Amino acid sequence: MASHDIAKRDYGEKAVEYQDFYDKRSLMSRLDEDLFGAAVNDSTTKGAVILDLGGGAGLKARMALDAGAAAVDVVDFSPEMMREGQQIEAALRRDLIRWFEGDVSQPFTHLPLRPQYDIVMANWVFDHSSSMEMLEGMFRNVASYLKPGGRFLSTRAGNPRAPCLSTGELGVIYKDLEEVPGGIRYRFHFTFPGIDIEGCSMETMYSGSTEMYEKYGLVDVENEPFENAEVVKENPELFKSFFDDPACVVVKATKRL
């Protein structure tokens, strides 16, 4: 079975447990939320209409709405993950997220999306690209739907072989690493609630290169400073090795005018 298909199966089977990983607030989930929260909480989010690629159960969509976004369209390949998000939104008595099933590496011509968006988000999406062709398909969608001058936000994995990913202290271990053309295939193992999700990252992304961003018209590429994460401030000693070889990065960029 292809890596992409395995990931879809994994998310479908573990949708509830995946949400638990964030609800229980492991160090990695806190880091992810702290860094993304710092990136999304600025003036450009207020009133913005957002496309969330691979948005799953809508965690980042809800963070954007809390930061003042007007509406979010989520596209994800897992109906089970989106169903979890729909239940959460129903409990909040809110109707600001639209949900669309789709493969974010493929064209969206069959989906009734808006022509362009103020912000496009793609969190952890690039870490399910098992080939350069898939990765480029994802970037084409980003570039196609982001308006000129619009903002791009993305959480991505760092080096899958980073030492901080081998101890479990952050709540995640990368295991079963396997070389594939252009990158590394692996399993995300969440130590709580003890689930595995298929992942695959291309070296052009986890190396920190800006080549792909620039190829698709994204400029002013920068990482959200780790110092902006509250969990890092609380655990400076624990995160020392993380700084040398980060496990994840939140990237910000702008579409060229």
Image: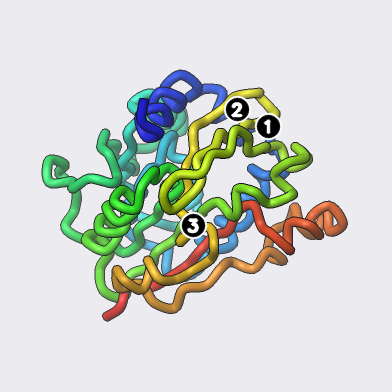
Q: Is residue 34 above or below residue 218?
A: above
**Which residue is at the front of the view, 71 or 221?**
221
Q: Residue furthest right?
A: 237
Residue 6 placement, left or right of 71: right
- Location of residue 175 in the rendering, given as x and y in whole percent from the top left corner: 63, 34
Residue at image coords 66%, 57% = 246
The C terminus: image quadrant: bottom left
- Sequence-wise, the earlier of marks 2 and 3 is 2
SS assignment at label 2: helix
Residue 114 in sight in this render: yes
Residue 62 in sight in this render:
no
Percent across and percent down for residue 43 are 46, 70
Quarter of the image with the N terminus in it:
top left
100 lies left or right of 93: left
Residue located beneath label 2 in the image = 20
Q: Which mark is residue 203?
A: 3
Q: CA distance from mark 2 to mark 3?
A: 30 Å
* Residue named by callout 1: 24
Label 3 environment density (alpha carbons within 10 Å; few <14, some 14–19, many ≥20): some
Is disc 1 in contact with disc 2, using a CB cutoff of under 8 Å? yes
